[in-house]
Amino acid sequence: MRNIVFSLLALATSLSAQNAPYDFFPAADPPYYRVRYEASTKPGELIFPVNYTIWIPPGVKSVRGVIVHQHGCGEGSCKSGLTGAFDLHWQALAKKHDCALLAPSYEQPEKADCQMWCDPRNGSGAAFQKCLVDLGGKSGHPELSKVPWVLWGHSGGGHWAGGMVLTHPDRVAAAWLRSGVPLLKANPDRPTIKTHTVPEAALKVPVMCNPGTKEGVTVKEGRFAGVWPANEEFFNAVRTKGGLIGVAVDPLTAHECGNSRYMAIPWLDACLSVRLPKNSGDAMNAMPTDGAWLAPLLGTEAVPAAQFTGDANKAVWLPNETVAKTWMQFVKDTQIPDTTPPPAPTNLRVNGNELAWDAEADLESGISSFIIERDGQVIGNVPEQPKNPFGRPIFQGLQYSDTPAMPLVKMTFTDSQAEAGKKHAYRVISVNTAGLKSK
């Protein structure tokens, strides 16, 4: 039974049409917890309602960090945040490091100014810190309000995550900015976008900028053509001061997240393995630089820092050899290899001809599907055809802001061909997105 960017030229909306209403919520029963805050009318506070859903790894005694998966601008992307904490792949990263997984969902009307939440100084930063206190009380983990933050953000969420690095650098362990970065110079075309400065402490925070190549790198026109110039400006401002920042251009995409999670998760894994303190509440560890690799900006080959012949303060910074090799594959075609099979499913339950089971995702490659066997013969797959319009087919499906599709898919199967009254032996096998099968 064991075998079982944010674009500076266009902020208003995401490209996807997400139809789930705000009153559609996946249940937030333990190990999930949720708080919701109404919009505020006080100056400087958040003008949109917001939901925060958190997942706490079952059995964890003390949380060591909070991984934040932040959606982008527009009503559709905001709704997609409702499922972010339920993502099995991101949960695998969180569980490995005894971290919680948090997903906000701002209730931003379609044509409202995204800056009113994606700039944390407009109230969202304070609301985020309040939610950690309140969720700590609900979950019995009061340490949530004090542990380091691990930030991932898409589009306006990248602007938010980068803004949190610049305004709270002592709290951030690492940050991945997919298509969005904070603005450092005033833009007369967007007067509502306030600029940031780069404090000295922010230079010690590992940061990765992750634009799509069609966002101004190889495609110079269109709605998101301003993303790369903004990323380049932000990278140069941080790197020329010695900041620990890199760039990983997605070679296949525009503003959609594509296969970026297969680079983001191992990069964050490497950073968290070093940065997070062993005991909750202790100070974060400094990111070591002696094993770093460097690559030319927009290049595809990285080398050990000691062998780099260009200007190191203009080069892409990568924390170690393993990450550098993964990065070289990602910027080539995103097809990062995986040689380890996923964990086997557990807790297979059979009730008549209804099967249900539990499973954890492969840290490197997530879950693509499950194979169902009866008496040693394959009788089905769940789902029959895994789908993902933005990248590798994945069990939970994927929305535009890299969150599971709604409604959440369940780990269940109905054996409609089972013979009544006859005993059968069932097995369920996990398949990761690299095609490898579990035991």
Image (tube, rainbow, N blue to C red):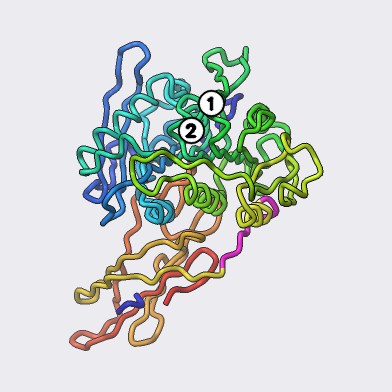
Is 26 or 18 nearer to us in this picture? 26
> Residue 71 occupies which quadrant of the picture?
top left
Question: Residue 255 lies in magenta, yes or no?
Answer: no
Question: What residue do we see at 77% from left, 49% from top?
Answer: 307
Question: Alpha-carbon neighbours of circle 2 within 10 Å: few (<14), some, or many (≥20)?
Answer: many
Question: What residue do we see at 48% from left, 44% from top?
Answer: 275
**What is the magenta range?**
331-338
Q: Quadrant of the C terminus?
A: bottom left
Q: Is residue 336 left or right of residue 410?
A: right
Q: Which residue is mark 1?
A: 11
Q: Amino acid at mark 1?
A: Leu
Q: CA distance from mark 1 to mark 2?
A: 16 Å
In percent of width and height, residue 245 lies at: 62, 38
Is 371 or 198 nearer to us in this picture? 198
In percent of width and height, residue 52 lies at: 31, 36
Q: Amino acid at mark 2?
A: Ala
Question: Alpha-carbon neighbours of circle 1 within 10 Å: few (<14), some, or many (≥20)?
Answer: many
Element under label 2? helix
Question: Residue 332 lies in magenta, yes or no?
Answer: yes
In percent of width and height, residue 250 lies at: 64, 46
Disc assigned to residue 143: none
Q: Main secondary structure of the magenta part?
A: loop
Q: Quadrant of the N terminus?
A: bottom left
Q: Where 60 falls versus 374 (above or below)?
A: above
Q: Is residue 430 left or right of residue 410?
A: right
Q: Which residue is mark 2?
A: 161
> Residue 233 occupies which quadrant of the picture?
top right
